[in-house]
Image: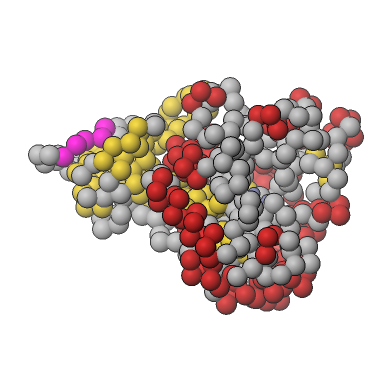
Amino acid sequence: MKAENKDRLLLRGGTVVDPQKQTTRRADVLVVGGCIEKVETSIPAAEGTEVLDCRGKHIAPGFVDMHCHLREPGREDEETIASGTAAALAGGFTRVCPMPNTEPAVDTEAQVRYQTRRAVEAGFARVHPVGCCTKARHGKELAEIGSMVEAGAVAFSDDGSPVSDAQVMRRVLEYCKAFDVPVISHCEVRELVEGYANEGRVSTRLGLKAGPDVAESAQAARDVLLAEFTRARLHIAHVSARATVDIVRWAKARGVQVTAETCPHYFTLTEDALASFDANYKVNPPLRSGDDRRAVVAGLADGTIDVIATDHAPHLKGEKDAEFDAAPPGIIGFETAFSLGYEKLVLGRVLSLADYVARLTVVPRRILNLPAAAVTAGSEAELVVLDLKAEWKYEPSGVLSLSRNSPFLGSTMRGRVSAVLLGERLFRL
Ligand SMILES: [Zn+2]
Ligand SMILES: [Zn+2]
């Protein structure tokens, strides 16, 4: 990825995607001093203006990944804020929200400020930290939610672990409601989970430690009811199971303030991939059945699932090389998310291109109270240039993340991010 500063840049000949209005139109975009000055059908290049040829390409607002793991502080051997935010930019994400399960966990104002500052120093994607619900993610005592909001935390979660105690979850929801920030629930009834294969026919045949889908859906049911009771905002992380989709749909119909996300692996893969015993298919929640996968796709199609997030979770090769039951769950996802969704959802006629882009831009911004995404005159330049005709091979040598734990390595992908413009900074891939 090459980065250059551009004072006057004309993106010429592209098609602008407006995810807010759900439209696309041919237009040139002139960016001066990091701000969008004009968006018009045809803009002549004045002297001193550099031109980026966007013919045949699409221009959209920068993507927001509301669920990822950057591993800093604590596991800088797996990922750093600098390497992670560079990988995020390569995937079109101009803003990312790291989960607080670092070492130590992000449960204070100082920790939130530290992560934000590290991202500014790195100069890649912007970071909006998610703070812990409870101190050290132990699920007992509430973390300093108010001061973390002041420091810039945009949501609260004990991700990696559930908030198992219902009374603690109720208090977290009440606190977050007072600050108008969402609580992100990692739904997992731990008592039901022995391992990270989906409990059923496949886990039995392969002899893998497993957990059933009800471990996810039972907690989703509890949490939407607590959100209704407290009138707080709840966001369900990484939906993988049909029953969870059904619960979110039911809760929305009741008027509960609930939103949900899924990740590309849940709408592209199933538990059948576990036959390879490759731990790069081990994620939490686990890959589930074809029926669950279809329900996740249907949930995206009808808007029950609002957002696509990556749950980018870097792990070292040595750890992932362990046998399946012993390896840590999680896969990297920044650099493949757009392409996987484009192929499965847009080319697969589940979502229009503008609707797909909205799930990566408008919707997460709305949930997190971030400024709206727009390719309009007067806004700061925060743009991705997409080459939808590109076919490319996802190779280890091209990965910007410090870790390589992806089951998609070696796959041919369709559609890719070809450039990102963040203020005056142009990143070319
Ligand atoms: Zn999680
Ligand atoms: Zn996560």
Q: Quadrant of residue 198?
A: top right
In the rendered view, tell whether residue 66 sits above or below residue 417: below
Of residues 303 and 419, the one drawn nearer to the viewer in this rendering: 419
Q: Residue placed farthest to the left in the image?
A: 47
Q: Residue placed at 61% from the left, 62% from the top?
A: 107
To which quarter of the image does residue 378 belong?
Answer: bottom left
Look at the image and give the residue range highlighted in magenta.
49-53
Q: How many marks?
A: 0
By what rule are the colours in the image chosen? secondary structure
Where is 360 relative to 233, above or below?
A: above
On the image, the x and y values in percent for residue 38 come to 22, 51
Side of 305 relative to 31 (left or right): right
Residue 209 in percent (x, y) is at 86, 39
Front-lying residue, 348 or 151: 151
Classify the position of the C terminus by image quarter: top left
Q: Nearer the viewer, residue 344 or 8?
A: 8
Q: Is residue 423 in view from this perspective?
A: yes
The image shows residue 32 at horizontal and vertical percentages of 21, 49
Residue toward you, 134 or 208: 134
Residue at 48% x, 60% y is 113
Quarter of the image for the N terminus: give it.
Answer: top left
The structure residue drawn at horizontal position 50% and vertical position 54%, both measured from the top left corner, is 115
Q: Majority secondary structure of the magenta segment?
A: strand
Residue 312 makes an appearance in the image:
no
Q: Is residue 40 above or below residue 78?
A: below
Q: Is residue 3 magenta?
A: no
Q: Residue at x 79, y 67 (%)?
A: 165
Residue 303 at x, y percent in the picture? 59, 55
